[in-house]
């Protein structure tokens, strides 16, 4: 996923953010990117995969939040 994960956000249900309902978005500070995480429960165990989603932000990402309209808001900082 990354070297310094900083925040998680669950994609809300309702299809406002494409086909990713219930999946996780993970912010990464050092590489200034967002990854998508898909988890699936098989019997009693979870398995999953991580995919690159958004990259090349101007600075490290510290927060993720979904707006009621479905937009993903990304909070960044250039400190550190």
Image (cartoon, rainbow, N blue to C red):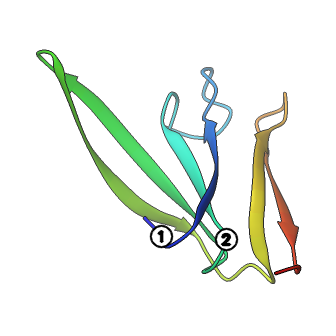
Q: Is residue 26 left or right of residue 39?
A: right
Q: Residue drawn at (84%, 27%), measured in percent from left and top? A: 68
Residue positioned 62% across, 76% down in the render = 55
Q: Residue furthest front?
A: 80
- Disc sitting over residue 12 in the figure: none
Mark 1 Cα-neighbour bin, 10 Å: few <14, some 14–19, many ≥20: some
| x then y, percent, for residue 22 | 50, 28
For image coordinates 60% across by 80% down, the residue present is 31
Quarter that holds the C terminus: bottom right
Task: Determine the residue located farthest toward the top in the rendered image.
Answer: 43
Q: Is residue 14 left or right of residue 23?
A: right
In this rendering, would 13 be left or right of 72?
Answer: left
Q: Relative to 35, does residue 12 appear above or below in the rendering?
A: above
User: Pointer 1: what residue?
Assistant: 2
Q: Are marks 1 and 2 in contact (CB under 8 Å)?
A: yes
> Mark 2 falls on what kind of element?
loop
Residue 78 figure quarter: bottom right
Per the image, the residue denoted by label 2 is 29
Q: Quadrant of the N terminus?
A: bottom left
Q: CA distance from mark 1 to mark 2?
A: 8 Å
User: In what element is the residue under mark 1?
Assistant: loop
């Amino acid at each position: 996923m990354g070297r310094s994960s900083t925040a998680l956000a669950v994609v809300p249900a309702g299809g406002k953010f494409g086909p990713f309902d219930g999946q996780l978005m993970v912010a990464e500070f050092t590489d200034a990117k967002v990854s998508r995480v898909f988890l699936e429960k098989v019997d009693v165990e979870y398995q999953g995969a991580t995919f690159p989603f958004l990259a090349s932000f101007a600075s490290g990402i510290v927060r993720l939040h979904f707006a009621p309209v479905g937009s993903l808001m990304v909070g960044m900082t250039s400190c550190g």
